[in-house]
Amino acid sequence: MAHFDVFNGDADGLCALHQLRLEHPIDSTLITGVKRDIDLVKRVEAVEGDTVTVMDVSFDKNRDAVTPLLNNNIAVTYFDHHFAGDIPDSPHLETHIDTASETCTGLIVNAYLNGAVLPWAVTAAFGDNLFASARAAAAPLNLNEDQLTQLEMLGTLLNYNGYGSSLSDLYFAPDDLYRKIKPYRDPFAFIAEDDAYATLEQGYADDMARAAATKASATTDSTALFVYPFESFARRVSGVYSNQLARDNPDRAHALLSTLEDGAYLVSVRAPLSNREGADDLCRQFPTGGGRKAAAGINHLPADQLDAFTEAFQTQFAG
């Protein structure tokens, strides 16, 4: 019998899997990719008797791949916080899905594990830009402000590493990064001991400085849209810079568009922190779009749809 762990390549997916496997270790085949690679279940090559755990990718985007597994008597356990759509009734499917805007998969797994690996759940929440949720979850840990800041940066860096149009954009393939954090029950030990942290910290600082030098190309009282060139730094920074902009301007929605090789755009959208709703509704209007209420994206927005997207973005968040 084989087991497959399917997980998003961002901070939330990494930390969710890490928590679960610290408490329930199992030899598994890892299936992941860049953050935007979310239709991952189709890569599972399982047979009857095998088991599958899926974390932090939309059930709606993977339903067509999950259904045949269930029909073949393959047990699937699903943890997620994205739009799910219709969930089939099957004795082989166990779901832990909560689409509330203030939660993430890491916090869902934390509840499932009764807080057994809480520091990594806090890291996941910070990585998903859920700063209030992260700090609330961290209360039982009695961390000082410096320790909270360290977990905030760790979550941010793990999230930063997941962004790109292909693995070549990333500093570490997500499965390799998971293997680096796997030995560490204590995230502070990972920060202090593993060279991956320093590599991501330097890359993040360089990329954020370049991102901050770019001015918005379209603004309203309640929105700002940025367009970045066809460069790896732009694809890497799209999510974390969107998160920073959201924190710096909590009543404004943000869209970051990174130009792709064919002239299309990779899009990251953040709803205002003061009203974390509507990002998923906006992005699902376009093919390859999806996400959650507070943060969503489009994997491939054709150049000739830029004006339509801009209009829809400004209408969605008109205030």
Image (tube, grey):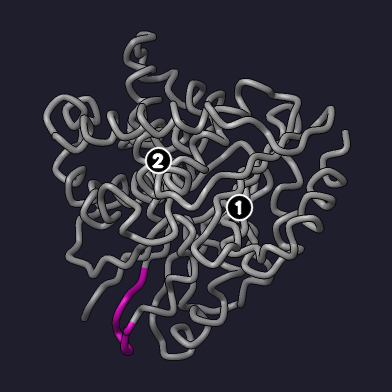
Image point 52% across, 55% down: which residue?
80
Q: Please state which of residues 45 and 285 is positioned toward the viewer in this rendering.
A: 285
Look at the numbered disc 1 and give the secondary structure of its residue.
strand
Residue 281 position in % (x across, y down): 76, 55
Look at the numbered disc 2 and give the secondary structure of its residue.
helix
Instruction: Answer few, some or many: residues within 10 Å of disc 1's Cα (few below 14, many 20 plus, some between 14 and 19).
Output: many
Q: Please state which of residues 103 and 198 is positioned toward the viewer in this rendering.
A: 198
Residue 267 image label: 1
Q: Please determine whether, in this image, residue 31 is positioned above or below residue 226.
A: below
Q: Is residue 214 magenta?
A: no
- Left of 125 or right of it: where is 113? left
Q: Quadrant of residue 205?
A: top left
Which residue is the site of mark 2?
160
For residue 316, say whether it is visible.
yes
Residue 141 position in % (x across, y down): 35, 19
Q: Please state which of residues 291 and 161 is positioned toward the viewer in this rendering.
A: 161
Residue type (three-letter) at the residue carrying disc 2: Tyr
Q: Quadrant of residue 307?
A: bottom right
Q: Earlier in the sequence, mark 2 or mark 1?
A: 2
Q: Please determine whether, in this image, residue 193 is positioned above or below residue 144.
A: below
Count of numbered circles in the view? 2
Instruction: Between label 2 and label 1, give the one nearer the viewer.
Output: 1
Image point 53% across, 27% down: which residue?
213
| Residue stretch rendered in magenta on the structure | 45-52
Residue 111 image label: none
Residue 273 position in % (x across, y down): 68, 29
For residue 281, say whether it is visible.
no
From the image, which quarter does the N terminus lie in?
Answer: bottom left
Q: Please determine whether, in this image, residue 21 is positioned above or below residue 51.
A: above
Q: Is residue 50 magenta?
A: yes
Alpha carbon distance from label 2 to label 1: 15 Å
Residue 121 position in % (x across, y down): 39, 36
